Image: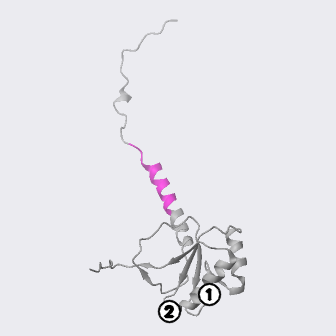
């Protein structure tokens, strides 16, 4: 059996499309868009507070932050759940799985007195949570240099 090379051209080669099919790419992008639309609201805290502004540069947020909020009426909220003050350590231990080196993001309303904020910080310290970040809004004004 001998194989002979074909000298005839196939007419289908000239009609081949050279464009890239973007339909699968669009499908993947739509699925990712839906996933992010669902996941984005879950990563924020819905406790309404009037946060003070700060001129410090913003830092990166961890993947699963621990939000502790102190409202103007001095009630504590862990994430979106109201929290009695005596249950602070137990609730933090449950959320962090007793990993005390996790950073706690403390949000306090600007009308909360400094002394009451210090009471919450002392509770966090006595519970073993020493990494506390105070959360504020980023100021749009740049600080002026003093001569």
SS class of the residue under badge 1?
Answer: helix
Q: Looking at this view, is 1 or 108 the one in front?
A: 108
Name the dominant secondary structure of the magenta segment.
Answer: helix
- Which image quadrant is residue 67 in? bottom right
Q: Looking at this view, is 91 or 120 the one in front?
A: 120
Taking the spot 48% from the left edge, 59% from the top edge, the residue there is 30
Tell me whether the residue at label 2 lies in contact with that at label 1, contact meaning CB atoms closer than 8 angstroms. Answer: no
Q: CA distance from mark 2 to mark 1?
A: 15 Å
Front of the two marks 2 and 1: 1
Q: Looking at this view, is 104 or 67 the one in front?
A: 104
The magenta stretch spans residue 30: yes
Residue 137, numbered circle: none
Taking the spot 54% from the left edge, 81% from the top edge, the residue there is 107
Residue annotated with mark 1: 119
Apparent side of residue 142 relative to residue 33 in the rendered image (left or right): left
Taking the spot 73% from the left edge, 77% from the top edge, the residue there is 90
SS class of the residue under badge 2?
Answer: loop
Apparent side of residue 53 relative to residue 113 in the rendered image (left or right): left
Q: Position of residue 113 (x, y in %)?
A: 53, 92
Q: Position of residue 120 (x, y in %)?
A: 62, 84
Tell me the quarter of the image containing the C terminus. bottom left
In the picture as drawn, the residue positioned furthest to the front comes out as 147
Residue annotated with mark 2: 111
In the picture as drawn, the residue positioned furthest to the left comes out as 147
Q: Which circle's residue, 2 or 1, is located before the other in the chain?
A: 2
Taking the spot 51% from the left edge, 67% from the top edge, the residue there is 61
Q: Looking at this view, is 62 or 19 the one in front?
A: 62
Magenta span covers which residues? 20-33
The magenta stretch spans residue 45: no
- Which image quadrant is residue 91 in? bottom right
């Amino acid at each position: 059996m001998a194989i002979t090379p074909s000298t005839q051209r196939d007419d289908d080669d000239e009609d081949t499309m050279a464009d890239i099919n973007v339909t699968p790419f669009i499908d993947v992008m739509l699925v990712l868009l839906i996933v992010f639309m669902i996941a984005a609201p879950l990563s924020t805290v819905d406790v309404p507070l009037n946060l003070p502004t700060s001129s410090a540069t913003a830092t990166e947020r961890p993947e699963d932050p621990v939000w502790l909020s102190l409202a103007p009426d001095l009630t504590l909220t862990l994430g979106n759940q109201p929290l009695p003050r005596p249950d602070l350590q137990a609730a933090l231990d449950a959320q962090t799985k007793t990993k005390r080196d996790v950073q706690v993001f403390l949000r306090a309303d600007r009308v909360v007195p400094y002394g009451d904020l210090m009471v919450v910080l002392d509770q966090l310290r006595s519970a073993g949570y020493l990494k506390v970040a105070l959360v504020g809004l980023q100021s749009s004004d740049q600080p002026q240099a003093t001569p």
